[in-house]
Image (cartoon, coloured by chain):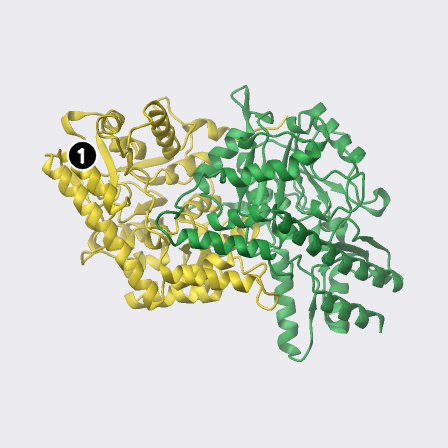
Chain colours: A green, B yellow
């Protein structure tokens, strides 16, 4: 009989957002007239920008003609898009990368998850708490978490507490860790690392020869100076860091699927047999073997994001979501809550009032105001007592939610 | 310092088709005037059917309007497409499956590769030889291959020789294996399993409680009776088999990316701690954690394949490729080669003449005729001395290739 991967048993059965969806569906079924406002899952609501729609139509037409039809494309992504990424995401920030260090994929979720394929056993893995659940779950799933203690903790995972005391910025650990996940601007706390804070991590990684996996999915929401948009803006990162970027929150691609992963050729890891290997080569082999490519039409859509018109439209959408975030932030401040994020991020992170638990507050908001948010505890133990709301709703539903809460 | 997954070192550095592409590019660079005809990689050349193009345009328009815009969809795929799969792929063949047994994904390559995430250690894995390289490579990569012997063989892999003597149909092994990959119609041999042949495997799997991973990516090319289009046409398969289907070769989606994986709820595996687990639940958890979904617009495109017009267009394309395959088959027969496949498959599998090696014959065809095929050895040791050609070229290039070969 087949042996299954027993590590799956160490995971909660459902993914966080699946749980929330079920709870909301049950509430809606019991209260069919309730006008539920969803400010929970980080999903966008603005339609795709006009320039992206035009690029899609044009690429679809190409696919309908034999002369311009495209079958299999390069597993790493088309050159036109990788070149556009270099020119638009990196060059203006003084970052030099090579074309074959850029990988186009179908989402930062897939890539951060699948990147664990490259890890050997024996690494100590540091993960912020609270944070996007995929980093932890994908490592547990692949056995990289190590043994599960009776307390529920994993022998090879070190959580990096992100608390009010440290402005939600994880501190470098005193002992060696091998792999470090960082997400800035952070999901869920909405706070962003400064140059100095991120530089400290790069120095740490270079000293201990650790690997940083840097998730920059929300960089486009940065409004303040002094906050890096890419980890490669800091010297040395090209020797220790992999960066994940996404069109999901930037350009509304949550249902269209496209992302960028950067694996510099100078980032290496060691193998038991001795010597080091290039993670760039490994990732290429992984993608060539277990992935095909992002659809051609979607790569053309992503390219359009960099056109002057596309760029303007994207900026407008970002401002729209940030206005929502500001309205939610100010609403909860008025209500007397301690509120964080929402300035360089679409996420608002709030301390639940009167010591309520995260899920308790979830039920309270759902039942009393018919507003859905995300319990902080879903992002890690340090998220208990906190709650995430997002600026990704429509302006109308956000205003309505604010009005309900302040009524 | 980070430990890398050392199993990657056990793989050849390049994926087969990457190697071929490089060789062809080098030849073209050295002979800029050579009119190279590519009948190597199994990539389609017909444009997307008109009904698919229309569905794409319409879905793109939906994405451009706030009222119809779609963000994150269900990780398992939209109900409209899963329902269409049930109604069109399975119901007409008397196969009853449930909606939550169907998973939409971005390709059979991704899914057959990623499915190895579900395997524990300790399985004996049977893989046909020759076959699509992803089954072997993805298992080596994840360490499921076991120890690599000095001969290059892997301790936990059992190859199932597919030779002229057994009509290229693998025989059930005398000893127990836990996981079995089958591909019918087969890539690369172009031969298909009969009901009786496949039934023998299901009986074997039920007796030993093994798991069959059945790749049906080429089922639409079946022209003869007596060949199952789905493994679930045979009783008992719903308790031991997972099936992979794809729109790539069926509807020209190699650059558009959509596939279907079926994981019946009654297929289980055991865990070390005792008891059994449902592979359906595990795959759902895997996909929810490390995948988002296939783009909405692509799912609408796949749905259109089942419209009366889409179905007619797809049939026409399949006949087109099969006519090419028949022409190639007959050409090599005229040349005195032993030729297989090409009847229920777009692939022609031929014995290289005069005992030439696979790569030797590759170079010979490329240099003498400027025709690119795929060396059989790239699909496994038993493929040595064989060569794969495909009917996926255009009718014009196929005719030109035939004329060159027979000149």
Label 1: few (<14), some or many (≥20) within 10 Å?
few
Chain letter for the residue marked with disc 1 in the picture: B
Query: Farthest top residue?
Result: A275
| In this view, B167 is above or below A388 | above
Which is nearer the eye, A379 or A97? A97
Q: Residue B167: in sight, yes or no?
A: no
Q: Nearer the viewer, residue A337 or B155?
A: A337
Q: Give whichever of A215, B196 is nearer the camera.
A: A215
Could you tell whether B339 is left or right of B137 in the image? left
* Viewer-closest of A144 and A348: A348
Q: Residue at x 49, y 49 (%)?
A: B274
Q: Position of residue B127 (x, y in %)?
A: 32, 40
Which quarter of the rendered picture does the N terminus of chain B lie within? Answer: top right
Number of numbered discs overlaid on the protein picture: 1
Residue A194 visible in the snapshot: yes
Q: Is residue B49 left or right of residue A215?
A: left
> Along the horizontal axis of the image, is A166 left or right of B139?
right
Q: Which quarter of the rendered picture does the C terminus of chain B lie within?
A: top left
Looking at the image, residue A33 lies above or below residue B30: below
Q: Residue at x 26, y 58 (%)?
A: B316
Residue A348 % position (x, y): 77, 55
Work out which residue is located at the far bottom of the displayed protein and give it: A33
- Give the x, y percent position of residue A118: 54, 34
Residue occupying image coordinates x 72% and y 51%: A188
Residue tagged 1: B404
Q: Secondary structure at mark 1?
A: helix
Q: In which quadrant of the rendered view does residue B387 lie?
A: top left
Residue B67: x percent and y percent?
Answer: 60, 69
Image vertical order of residue B55 relative to residue A347, above or below: below
Name the side, left or right, on which A189 lies relative to B321.
Answer: right
């Amino acid at each position: 009989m087949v042996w299954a991967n027993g590590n799956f048993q160490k995971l909660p059965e459902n993914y966080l957002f699946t749980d929330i969806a079920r709870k909301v569906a049950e509430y809606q079924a019991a209260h069919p007239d309730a006008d539920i406002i969803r400010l929970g899952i980080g999903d966008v609501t603005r339609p795709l920008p006009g320039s992206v729609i035009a690029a899609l139509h044009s690429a679809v037409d190409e696919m309908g003609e034999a002369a311009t039809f495209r079958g299999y494309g390069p597993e790493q992504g088309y050159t036109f898009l990788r070149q556009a990424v270099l020119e638009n995401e990196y060059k203006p920030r003084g970052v030099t990368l090579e074309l074959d260090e850029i990988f186009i994929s179908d989402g930062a979720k897939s890539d951060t998850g699948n990147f664990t394929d490259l890890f050997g056993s024996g690494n100590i893995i540091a993960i912020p708490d609270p944070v996007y659940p995929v980093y932890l779950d994908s490592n547990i799933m692949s056995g990289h978490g190590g043994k599960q203690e009776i307390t529920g903790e994993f022998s090879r995972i070190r959580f990096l507490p992100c608390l009010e005391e440290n402005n939600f910025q994880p501190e470098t650990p005193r002992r060696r860790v091998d792999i470090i996940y960082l997400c800035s601007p952070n999901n869920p706390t909405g706070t962003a690392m400064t140059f100095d804070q991120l530089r400290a991590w790069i120095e740490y990684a270079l000293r201990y020869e650790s690997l940083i996996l840097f998730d920059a999915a929300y960089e486009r929401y940065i409004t303040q100076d002094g906050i890096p948009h890419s980890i490669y803006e800091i010297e040395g990162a090209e020797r220790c860091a992999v960066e994940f970027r996404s069109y999901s929150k930037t350009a509304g691609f949550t249902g269209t699927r496209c992302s960028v992963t950067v694996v510099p050729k100078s980032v290496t890891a060691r193998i038991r047999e001795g010597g080091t290997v290039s993670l760039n080569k490994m990732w290429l082999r992984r993608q060539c073997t277990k992935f095909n490519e992002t659809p051609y039409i979607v790569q053309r859509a992503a390219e359009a994001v960099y056109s002057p018109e596309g760029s303007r439209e994207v900026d407008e959408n970002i401002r729209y979501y940030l206005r929502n975030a500001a309205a939610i932030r100010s609403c909860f401040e008025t209500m007397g809550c301690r509120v964080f994020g929402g300035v360089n991020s679409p996420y608002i992170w709030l301390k639940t009032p009167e010591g309520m638990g995260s899920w308790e507050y979830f039920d309270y908001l759902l039942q009393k105001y018919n507003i859905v948010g995300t319990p902080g505890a879903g992002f890690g133990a340090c998220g208990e007592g906190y709650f995430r709301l997002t600026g990704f709703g429509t302006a109308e539903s956000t205003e309505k939610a604010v009005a309900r809460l302040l009524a």
